[in-house]
Image: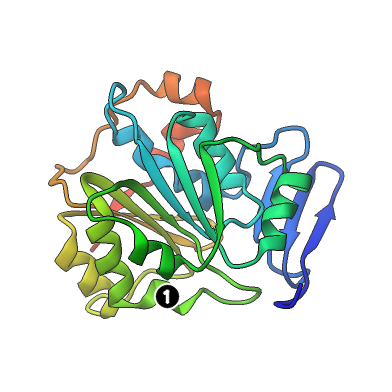
Amino acid sequence: DAMGNIFVLDTRKHRVLSFDSIFEQSKMERSKPGLPVHEYNRAMLLPLAFMEPLRQPRRALVLGLGGGVMTHALHRMVPECQIDVAELRRKVGMVAHEFFGLPQKPQINIQVTDGRAMLEASPEHSTDLIFADLYNADRMSAIQSKRSFVRMSSRALTDSGWLVANYHRVPEPGGIVHRAIRNHFATVLTYTSKSRNTVIFATRQTLNWPVKPRWEISNLERRLPIGWKRLLNRLQPLD
């Protein structure tokens, strides 16, 4: 499309979405659509373990579609949740449906817009989960490194909601993102993957460390077999 290349690459076992043929935007097992392969993608789902089983999220925002693997996995976990997706490139949404098995469901609403516009348009306290994974071909979107992104996310979230954001490195202590997250959220956790991606989890709830899951791990694993126990064990509070 006008914004550049979109590659769908197959190996013997996996299918990969790339914008430059070097960095992987999304990855799935071809025989298991909706099951995230990348460790940081799997980790991004961890706040579901901290939500009451009888009070599942009603609305989620996904900022950046990629191959739709994250959106598909979220839909598998909470099929009644309304998932609004912000994706700049209409063609990426077409590729997610055609090549990555993203289901056409009324609960999944893909909007051709940027993440900032979707956050700005979200009513106050309307959203239970915000997943931000905003990357172009070779770098993270500048949106995720701004105070306004953290502020708008906090405004859109319910009191028990979670912001989940994938960063290419740990936000610098005392830096813009670090200070903004500390100012707006009471509990902040991190997960650093083997690829050195750092996922930030932030909620206005005051939760004691270690944060205990409210689901039985076996129930989570039956719904989506991604190794929940191992992922939970690698969570850390933000320094």
Residue 112 shown left or right of residue 208 in the figure: right
Give the residue displayed 33% in from the left and 30% down from the top.
Answer: 56
Q: Is residue 42 visible?
A: yes
Q: Which residue is tagged 1?
A: 143
Sort mark 1 into few (<14), some (14-19) or many (20+) by Cα contacts within 10 Å.
some
Q: What's the residue at 34%, 66% (across, down)?
A: 120
Observer able to see residue 233: no
- Tally of marks: 1
In the picture, the quarter occupied by the C terminus is: bottom left
| Residue occupying the point 74% across, 53% down | 95
Q: Estimate the x, y position of residue 230 in percent, counting from the top left.
A: 45, 37
Horizontal and vertical percent position of residue 118: 42, 62
Among the 4 quarters of the image, the one containing residue 179: bottom left
Instruction: Pick the residue in front: 7 or 127.
Output: 127
Q: Nearer the viewer, residue 56 or 181?
A: 56
Q: Is residue 226 left or right of residue 34?
A: left
Q: Choose between 157 and 182: the one closer to the eye.
A: 157
